[in-house]
Every structure is written in C-alpha cells, then in structure tokens.
Image: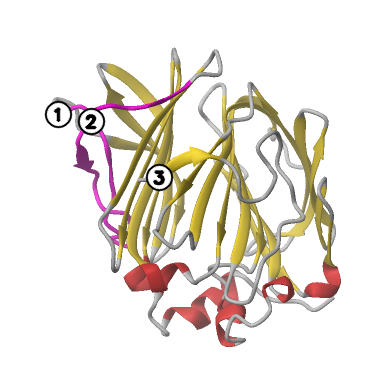
Amino acid sequence: MPIRKARSRNDIERPRFDVEVKANGYAWWYVDGISDDGNKAISIIGFIGSVFSPWYYWANRKNPENHVCVNVAMYGKGWRWTMTERGEKKLKRDKDTLQIGPSSFRWEKDHLIINFNEYSIPHFDNVKGTVKIFPKFISDLECNFLNDESHIWRPFAPLSRIEVDINKPGWQWGGHGYFDANFGSRALEKDFSYWTWGRFPTKDGSYTFYDAMPRREPSVNVALLFKNNGVIEKVQNPPDISTLSRSLWLVKRETRSDKDFKPKQTKHMLDTPFYTRSGVETSIFGEKSVGVHEALDLNRFSSSLLKPMLAIKAPRYNW
C-alpha cells in the first residue's frame, strides 16, 4: 500500500482548497470532534462533486463544481443535520478558502476556521456557528488507494484540538479533533465494495485505520500512529479486524481490536442504509480508546432505489 510523501496538490505544508476536480471526480475536506466529556460530537464535510449526491449521479457526474455542499452533523442532545446541495454559482474558492453558499472553510496561518449558516432537516431551523481546528502538526503523508492513483487520502491533522460554538443550547465546547481530505477521479462505488475507517486517540497520540475492499485489486489495509511529538509510524502487525454489532440498518461494521477485547459502540451518530458513523470503544495494544468509526457499504449505495431517499435527506437548491 503506497503511503508516501504528499505530492499531488502542493499541500505538503498546509491544506489547499484550489485543487482541480475533473468530471466524474470529487474532493472532500472532513472534520470531526468529540467533546471532552464525551457527551457531544460533530462532523463537518465540505464537498466538491458530492460523492453521495443523487443529483450528481443523475447529472452523470459531468460537472463536480455544480454539486457542492457543506454537511454539518451534530450528535448528542440538541442534534441537528444539514446537507443542502448547491450549484456552481454558489462556489467560490482559492488556496485559502472554500466558500459554498453561506458556509466556508478557511485556512488561517496554522489553523482551520469553519463558519456555517445552514438549514436543518427534519428540525427545519437555522444552524449557525463556528468550528475551529488547531492541529498539533500537519502530516506530510498521503495514501494512494489504487494503482492508478484514482483515490487519495490526505490526513492533514489527525491530532487536533477542536473548538465548537453553535447557536444551540449546550453547543459551546472543546474536545479532541481530526481533519483530513479525500480526492478522486472516479465514483467510489465503481472501485470499492466496502470500507471501514476509524481514528482512536491514545496517550501517545492517535491511531488511524483504513481497511477497504477494492473491486479489482487486493484489499487496502492502512494502520498509522500519529504521535504527539509529530512522528508518524506505520503500525507493524496491527490488531486484527474484529466485528462490531451491525447498525440499525444492518450495515456490517468492523474495526481493529486486540483479540481479547470486543469493540462496541459508545455513541450513536449517523445511521443510513449504506453508511454508519459512531463512537466506538476498542483496545489497541492493551490500551482502551474511544474514537470515531465509519463503515460504508458501496454495494448498497449502488442501488438506484436509494437515490430518491437521499434526495430528501440532501435537498438541492440552485440559489
């Protein structure tokens, strides 16, 4: 598995938002965080060529810049979900800023600022706030998932501090955070059938595991330790893949765990017919950790029956 120095987008020292995204392709920038008390969590994704958009699919993936959105998902008491797709007239970007409608990602010197002003479904109310990510360091690695470099993962700041300030009671908090990006030139479902990802903070830093099943190449298995001192280590002989209970939609879930420990869900986050995100407790080399985990079933996502359901959850507006 080619884990290598970042080289594809001139982003080895900092993220950039002016990357080229061609027809059929995508780019997304992902942030998550869990509060210090463990009661709340958040994920925010800025999409160009929104990979789960039925609108992009129905448009034959011709113009990724015409299918953009900022997805804000709040987990815990007072939860909210926003995912409004917009057209290319509402996209503005340069190396420092990604602006999509009323929301933006902005890199400022050594940290990321996300401002958003979105509309929640099914609560039908305004969700407005600011989230800041303060990395301990910027990693210089990227991971090329397939031989033709059609899917690349860029873990910018797996060790971060997050500050959350949202216009809802109790949604002003700090915690441990994470920031990465993915870039690709083809639809995920064309090249993969399934993947899991997880990031688990420990006393020495944070482990990140990526296990994916390409349709035409051998399995992808990435295990990295991002240490507090900025050192990044490939994990030799990582814990085996262990099963978790299936999600409410019966999506298969797996993660890395010591043999004598059964991983378990600690926080319900997002549950769909093809994708699940949750807080998960596992054990890595004898140390227990609660982190963020996702499982994605792309065989399910490929079903045309899902697309109208997704259009309700992720409406499109051309304004």
Q: Which residues are magenta?
A: 232-259
Q: Nearer the viewer, mark 1 or mark 3?
A: 3
The residue wearing badge 2 is 239
The image quarter in which residue 119 lies: bottom right
Left or right: residue 258 versus residue 138 is: left
Give the x, y percent position of residue 232. 47, 24
Give the x, y percent position of residue 192. 36, 65
Mark identifier at residue 259: 1
Q: Nearer the viewer, mark 2 or mark 1?
A: 2
Give the x, y percent position of residue 77. 58, 40
The residue wearing badge 3 is 2
Answer above or below: position of 57 versus 37: below
- Counting other residues with Cα less than 10 Å from the Cα at mark 1, is it few (<14), some (14-19), or many (20 or more)? some
Answer above or below: position of 300 versus 245: below
Q: Is there CB contact under 8 Å for labels 2 and 1? A: yes
Q: Mark 3 or mark 2, which is nearer the start of the sequence?
A: 3
